[in-house]
Amino acid sequence: MDRVILTGIGSGAEKQEYDPDLEEMKGLIEAAGLDLVMVMLQPRYRPDRATCIGKGKLTELKHLVDELEADQVIFNLDLSPLQIRNLEQALEIPVVDRTMLILEIFKQRAHSHEGKLQVELASLQYQLPRLTGRGRAMSRLGGGSKLRGAGEQQLELDRRYIRKRIQDIKSQLAKVEKTRQLHSQRRQRQGLKTASLVGYTNAGKSSLFNTICSMAHSSGQAQVAADQRLFQTLDTTTRKVRLPSGREVLLSDTVGFINQLPHHLVAAFRSTLKETVEADLLLHVVDRADPLYLDKMTVVEEVLEDLKVGPKPILVVFNKSDLLDPDMVLDGDGINVSAHTGFGVEKLLETIDKLL
Ligand SMILES: Nc1nc2c(ncn2[C@@H]2O[C@H](COP(=O)(O)OP(=O)(O)OP(=O)(O)O)[C@@H](O)[C@H]2O)c(=O)[nH]1
Ligand SMILES: [Mg+2]
């Protein structure tokens, strides 16, 4: 397990206050299977253009890296190509920013051919301007050994290789997408309506998917994995579900969203998310027990807007109601459920029936 130091801009850690962004970063580090050995944030108004954290902090960080024998340094925000280059030069170990960390998690989770291609495309597009010439990016891609050259020449070869690979992946993805379109046409011919579970990562989409499938006589019995790790789900799973009226619908479990997900990353997942975008109904699953649930709902709404989800009904599903004070469990603008106890799920299915 790689030993990592988390650093960047912020204050919560120093003041020992609860800092939700810091907790989320820790969650991402855990999800990536890394061993967090130290947190060192610098309270700053804005990041330094060249090194993100200030010079003195960087010297301090270098000492920590040596002392704690860290393998990587992770920043709690995204870095520019210039910052990455300077930081790696100073620290002499790989520097990973927030987007790279999320991509690493996605890479570990991708199982389907399409999912793998999409993750590779997203990370290549992110890495291209950030190649430092230290050969680190290429070794991560597993394609470095075939390339010869040194310094700038090597860098140019790497760039050329990556651009070519990006083209290859794009054309492969286009083919996969065509197949997907055929499938969805066939589905439409069967006259089945579709509903997708969307929401912030860890909201309980997969747990709810399992509960619905086991209650609603779905065609497939196998469960999808649910876990407190962030981004447990990457690939979309779709099952047939029978609603109380007897009508059958296709229900999909999808990848979760997160605050400040870079646009190109979302673009890389657009074809997977197409199922979501093209669904007849969206179920926006919310972890109602999370103190930040309103902020997270806003993030999800923004991502959906970004994905150009057309006008369609969106049903808000407040999950984890078992963790709430019973007095707080009121159906307002959504339906309260608990994927764990099954509370509210019958009512949810009836509402889906009505909306479709
Ligand atoms: N108490 C309680 N916990 C729940 C409920 N639903 C889900 N959880 C827990 O919340 C965590 C996340 O659940 P998942 O179903 O994996 O969430 P997800 O939205 O699919 O997450 P990603 O796939 O990572 O985006 C797990 O630890 C679940 O056990 C619920 O109704 N009540
Ligand atoms: Mg999931």
Image: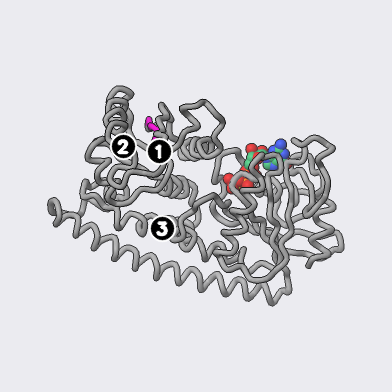
Please rate how many residues cluster around mark 2, counting C-alpha atoms within 10 Å: few if below 14, some from 14 to 19, many from 20: some
- Residue at 29% x, 66% y is 164
Residue occupying image coordinates x 49% and y 59%: 266
Residue 288 is drawn in which quadrant?
Answer: top right
User: What residue does disc 3 label?
Assistant: 122
- Dot 2 falls on a residue whose secondary structure is loop
N-terminal label among 3 and 2: 2
Image quadrant of ligand 1 equals top right
Q: Circle 2 sits on which residue? A: 54
Q: Which residue lies furthest to the top in this view?
A: 67
Disc 3: CA contacts within 10 A as few (<14), some (14-19) or many (>=20):
many
Task: Please name whichever residue, 283 or 43, is drawn nearer the observer in this view of the structure.
Answer: 43
The answer to which of marks 3 and 1 sits earlier in the sequence is 1
Residue on which the image places disc 1: 44
In the image, residue 77 above or below residue 117: above
Amino acid on which disc 2 is placed: Gly
**What residue type is disc 1 on?**
Arg
Of label 1 and label 2, which has the lower sequence position? 1
For the point 57% across and 59% down, the residue is 303
Q: Where is residue 118 in the image (x, y as percent from the top left)?
A: 45, 59
Q: What element carries label 3?
A: helix
The colour style of the image is one colour
Which-is-in-front pick, marks 3 and 1? 1
Secondary element under disc 1, as helix, strand or loop, is: loop
Disc 1 to disc 2: CB gap under 8 Å: yes
102 left or right of 352?
left
Residue 4 versus residue 272: which sits nearer the camera? 4
Ligand 1 closer than 8 Å to the CB at disc 3? no
Please state the extent of the stretch shown in magenta in the rendering.
Answer: 3-9
In the rendered structure, the answer to whether residue 305 lies left or right of residue 94 reads: right
